[in-house]
Every structure is written in structure tokens, then in C-alpha cells.
Amino acid sequence: MLVSITFDVEHDCPPYLTTTRGMREGLPKLLDLMAEKKIRATFFFTAEMAKRFPELVRRVIDEGHELGSHNYNHERLDKLSRDEGRKAIEKSIKVLREFGEVVSFRAPNLQFPNYYYDILEKNGILVDSSKARYKGYQDGVKFFGSVLEVPASTTSSVIRLPWSVQKLIHAKLSEPKIYFAHPWEFVPMQKEKIRLDCKFNTGDKAIELLGKLIDYYKSQGAEFLTMREYYDRYQKLKRK
Ligand SMILES: [Zn+2]
């Protein structure tokens, strides 16, 4: 079984807040958890957060995780013109590549019109994970030109549901099972004026639940892949 843990590394709960508590308190805890569980993850950073927290980008890379792009400052691609979107993507990748290799992309809000595949391809992106099965995307992992689409399985709040409830959902997801979460979900958000689904079980409870999720898949012998690793596997299959 193939499972992936991915993080969309952005300021707190866009577009509602502009704070960065998740970066300061949440992300270090997530990196500690990944180290404890010996799991490698993909961290899709906005360039803005990478510029403000370069030491966290370096920690992600030094600890063996994959650095990906989550656009420049969380601009929604479906709300920009194709040209404005292209500029934001290119600017983001340029900043992030100063830290290391960047070959994976996830669009903010998982809003990704298909005409952007071509732009990713021209910018050396190999994997996109912007499509969402929970938003009705029907296909599995497949190539769009030379870009491999690895769709997200379920929305981030699912992994904060009570364990007895979320367990039923995990079992039903088709493979590969691609999860995502945000650093701000791992600091208490209960007092913020944001949507209810963005704040329940945030903080240490979310860390505990993510640990449970990882243990659940480990006990089933799952393999945890970074986005880049899907590309290597599917390229091989393609050549056969
Ligand atoms: Zn995001």
C-alpha cells in the first residue's frame, strides 16, 4: 500500500488570517513528529513563508524531506489570468530553488485549471498534486504531458476527526492515499474567527491524531512516498 503525508506550508488559515503561528509553533512540532516516526514527507511551501522562515526550509531539506511549491503567496490560480498565474508560479519556484531541488507543485485551495500543466512542464516541475478526489476528480495517478498528477485523497480536516470516525474514511480511500495538512492546524485555532471545520481539534490533539494515522498505516506495512518518488516509479512503469 502506498501512502503520502504532505503539508501545505502557508500563513495561518488563508484567506481568513495573516498570522504565522503555524510556522513558528506548528511546523517544528510536525518535523519532530516525522523524525520520531521516521517518515519522509513533502512540504509544499509558499515562497513567502520560505523567505520569512528560511531556517525551517533548511530543516525540511536537512531532515530528508521533499521541498515543493505552494505558489508565491497562496494566490489562487483559478482567480488569476493564465499569465498572472504563470508569473506567480515562476516567481515561487525561483525563490524555492535557492534552497534546493523543487520538482513538485500543489496549487492553493487545490484549484488548478488544466491549462497550467503546460506551465509546470516548462518550469521543470515533474509532479503536480493539485487535483482532489474529494472535489470530484475521478482519475487516479496519470501523466498530463510530462507532468505526473498525483491527486489528493481527502481534505485536511478529516485527519482531525475523532479516530473512530476517521478510521472508517481511511479504509475506503483508493490508493495511493495522499493526505495533506497545514502547520496552522497544529496550533490551537479554537479562538479564531474562522470556519468551524478549520478549528476543531487543532493544536496538540491534531499532532496526536496524525501520529495515530501514521501508526495505523505502518501497522499495515504501508510504504510512505514523497511526491518525487511517485514520479520515479511511474516513469519506470511507462518505459516498460
Ligand atoms: Zn494552501
Image (spheres, helix red, strand yellow):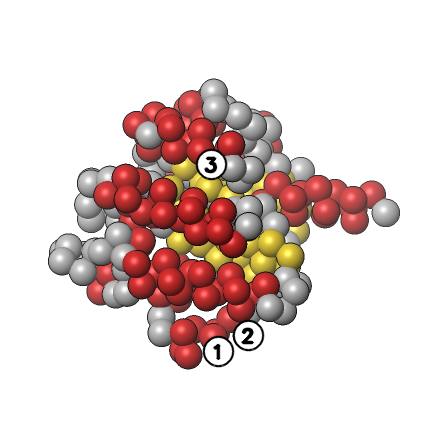
Query: Residue sitting at 28 percent across and 65 percent down?
Result: 201
Query: Residue sitting at 40 percent across and 53 percent down?
Result: 181
The answer to whether residue 187 is left or right of residue 148 is left
The answer to whether residue 100 is left or right of residue 239 is left
Residue 123 shows up from this direction = yes
Say which residue label 3 marks: 60
Q: Amino acid at mark 1?
A: Leu
Residue 6 shows up from this direction = no
Q: Amino acid at mark 2?
A: Ala
Q: Nearer the viewer, residue 72 or 37?
A: 37
Say which residue label 1 marks: 168
Q: Quadrant of the N terminus?
A: bottom right
- Please name which of the two marks, 3 or 2, marks the residue nearer to the observer: 3
Q: Amino acid at mark 3?
A: Val
> Label 2, label 1: how many angstroms apart (C-alpha)?
6 Å
Say which residue label 2 marks: 171
Provide the secondary structure element on which disc 2 rests. helix
Q: Residues within 10 Å of mark 2 (few under 14, many from 20)?
A: few
* Dot label at residue 230: none
Provide the secondary structure element on which disc 3 rests. helix
Q: Residue 185 location, x and y as percent?
A: 31, 54
Q: Is residue 50 above or below residue 225?
A: above
Q: Earlier in the sequence, mark 3 or mark 2?
A: 3
- Please name which of the two marks, 3 or 1, marks the residue nearer to the observer: 3
Query: Residue sitting at 30 percent across and 27 percent down?
Result: 52
